[in-house]
Image: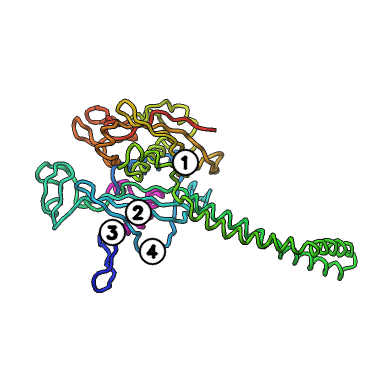
Amino acid sequence: MAYYDSNGVLQIDPLEVEMGRKVLEFNKLQNDYYMNRVSEEEIAINTTQNQYEDMVLSKKRLEEHNLCKEIFLQSKFRSYVPVQIRKDGDNLVGTARYNVKAVRNYYLGDKRIYSEKTKEICNTNFLKYNIQYGYAKCPRCGNIAKIETYTDGCDYCGAAFSVRGLVPKIASFILEENGAEKKVGLFSKLAIGFILAIPLSFAALIVSAVCASVFEPLAWLSDICMIIFSLLFVNLELIGFLFIVAIIGLVISTVVVSKSNKSPFYNTDIIKKYIPYISMQELIQGIESKVSHIYLTDKPENTAAYVKAYINSFIEEHSDVVDMCISRITFTDCKERKGLYRLELEVIVKLYRMKKGRIRTEYECVNLVLEGKKGVVDVNNYKPIRSYKCTGCGDNINITAGGVCHNCGKPYQYEDYDWVITVLSKRN
């Protein structure tokens, strides 16, 4: 957090700067990965397990359609993005949320087949292992030792990892459509267009009348222009009134829309009534990740760990979706019953679909029901899972491939740690 010291000099937390720079650097790393310029190993080093699996799944869908993509994010930040940092157990967690102009480019081979500029919100979360005074804790056994002793892993339990694994990692990197900024832009264009239409109409009439008087064959046009001009002159007060109304409307609409809910998440108070200490930021992060998996997976069994609804036909119907982003999430109900919290919500997503060699965009609304065990949600205040470990052998589990341990075959009991989707339906 930035602050002014006793001498009036602005001081900035070095860790905030380190994480803030990583936001900007990660956008380039992400583009390099999707354009096949860096390996999966580089992504694994810089991300947590869940973000790594999200990116691998997204790239797999692109490759199924022989596509690559680049998303360039433009913002007012040049050197680093402001980050809010808090302690989470033995780790430090950072959050950066800021407005961007996203330039999306999709390539089929070397040919760019789609380009789009949109106003979006970049929502990024970090995880950094807590290193103090040159000491760090082993992520596996908790052994505390000097950082230089972790060169080849933990000497106590034998866990294999490198010191690079202790650098800040991206836990989630999500783009959300900025609906508020889009509304401001739309109102402004309509009002400005109306305001400019009046003087331009007068100018066009005058030019037409002059041209018609000079060229005799167009004399009839001069008569028509004079009739229209005289009608406008008679109603000059009305036109002036409409002109002033348009200007006032532009100012009011811009102020009202800019002060309205800039977040794409609505009715969050419904949840706070039953779960007052829940972190909405992290709950929504989990929802966005699950919805993305459902749209981009190719088999329903790949989502079996956290989706307890029938989605076979839904996945088949969306096999042409190559990318997506969340446009809006509206919570409609929250209940507590028989040791479970039940959330009902409506999610509007923007889809990028590959049809006949071209990318088309469309919006779709899905209704979801999430259930979470009361004990799990209350105890954890809902903290998203950042890694999936088998409770049998301790090996990593790929949650986007069914959530079953490839080593011992034990399924991951997702409902013991997080919310699961019990109902999914598409709304027309």
Disc 1 or 4, which lies upstream in sequence? 4
Secondary structure at numbered mark 2: strand
Disc 3 or 1, which lies upstream in sequence? 3
Task: Estimate how packed mark 3 is, as few (under 14), some (14 to 19) or many (20 or more) residues with alpha carbons within 10 Å.
Answer: many
> Where 91 falls versus 347 (above or below)?
below
Bounds of the magenta segment: 16-45
Q: Are marks 1 and 4 in contact (CB under 8 Å)?
A: no
Q: Tell me the mark number nearer the camera, choosing from 1 and 4.
A: 4
Disc 2 or 1, which lies upstream in sequence? 2
Q: Is residue 34 a member of the stretch shown in magenta?
A: yes
Name the residue tied to disc 4. Answer: 78
Q: Are marks 4 and 3 in contact (CB under 8 Å)?
A: no
Q: How far apart are the two marked residues, 2 and 1, measured between alpha carbons?
A: 26 Å
Name the residue tied to disc 3. Answer: 16
Most common SS among magenta residues: helix
Residue 265 position, x and y percent, is 43, 44
Q: At 44% from the left edge and 56% from the top edge, which residue is drawn?
A: 100
User: In the drawing, does residue 47 fall left or right of residue 141?
Assistant: right
Q: Are marks 4 and 2 in contact (CB under 8 Å)?
A: no
Q: Amino acid at mark 4?
A: Arg
Residue 10 position, x and y percent, is 29, 69
Q: Tell me the mark number nearer the camera, choosing from 4 and 3.
A: 3
Q: Amino acid at mark 3?
A: Glu
Q: Tell me the mark number nearer the camera, choosing from 4 and 2.
A: 2
> Where 262 falls versus 374 (above or below)?
below
Along the line of sight, the residue nearer the viewer: 305 or 400: 305
Disc 4 or 2, which lies upstream in sequence? 4
Indicate which disc residue 96 carries. 2
Residue 220 position, x and y percent, is 89, 62
